[in-house]
Amino acid sequence: MDNISQTEENYLKAIYKVSENSGAKASTNAIAADMNTSAASVTDMIKRLNEKGLVLYESRRGVSLTDEGARIATELIRKHRLWEVFLVDKLRFSWDEVHDIAEQLEHIKSDELIKRLDTYLAYPKFDPHGDPIPDAEGNFTFRKQAPLSESKMGDNVIVVGVQDHAPAFLQYLDRLHLGLGAELEVLDLHEYDESMKVRLENNREETLSRKVCEHLLVQKRQKA
């Protein structure tokens, strides 16, 4: 669809993300929070997108994307995450620097550019934050993962993703050397504040807050 603005594209992506996270239709308030705007502005935009056949809206029941709306949102996510891989792997940006740059690059309208970018990067399945990158047909690669907060004492896990992309959080993880691929062992669970004591590389021990544990995605390490 050619007659769609960058702002409209951003709303479609926000609706996709909110619906994906909640497992239900996106509410006006949730979209407003994601877009950092007012509920009234969201309502106006939803009406415009509805007229273009990109969303379905039922009063008090929320918003969902049509097939065309979902296709556009998925394409944006694909471009955004591919650009993040390029910025980190090829231009050596850190993972806390790339989101805003990728937000600008994702609106480039060249299908051939993205096809060549994907080929150049050797068809990555996940971005620098561990999020799946849809392929050219819109298919995502999913894996078994869970928040660190669901781990039990004695578990050995590896960090495969983050649920919070805020620069402050990513910089905090960098200070702890807790990037993707970091291995850790759960040593203790503190009932009082639900924090978690873990052993990192070089036998270094850290206590992580409940909030940090909820935002770290991990896989169990296979026993030798």
Image (cartoon, rainbow, N blue to C red):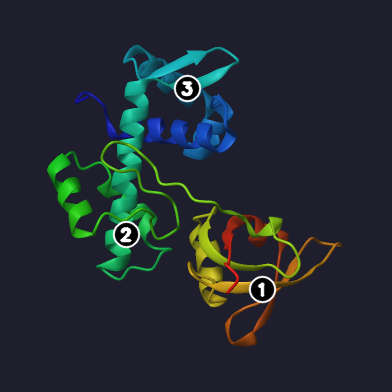
Q: Which residue is rendered at x = 64% and y = 86% of the image?
A: 203
Taking 224 as reference, is 41 above or below it?
above
Q: Which residue is rendered at x = 32% and y = 29% of the image?
A: 71
Query: 204 or 59: nearer the eye?
Result: 204
What residue would you read off at disc 2?
A: 85
Mark 3: secondary structure:
strand
Distance in Å between CA atoms under marks 2 and 1: 28 Å
Q: Which residue is rendered at x = 58% and y = 74% of the image?
A: 224
Amino acid tagged 2: Val
What residue would you read off at disc 3?
A: 64
On residue 134, the disc is: none
Q: Position of residue 121 (x, y in %)?
A: 23, 59
Q: Quadrant of residue 189?
A: bottom right
Residue sticking out furthest to the right? 192
What residue would you read off at disc 1?
A: 185
Distance in Å between CA atoms under marks 2 and 3: 29 Å
Taking 123 as reference, is 6 above or below it?
above
Q: Assess disc 1: are there few (<14), some (14-19) or many (≥20) residues with their C-alpha within 10 Å of its C-alpha.
A: many
Viewer-nearest of discs 2 and 1? 1
Q: Position of residue 24 (x, y in %)?
A: 57, 27
Amino acid tagged 1: Glu
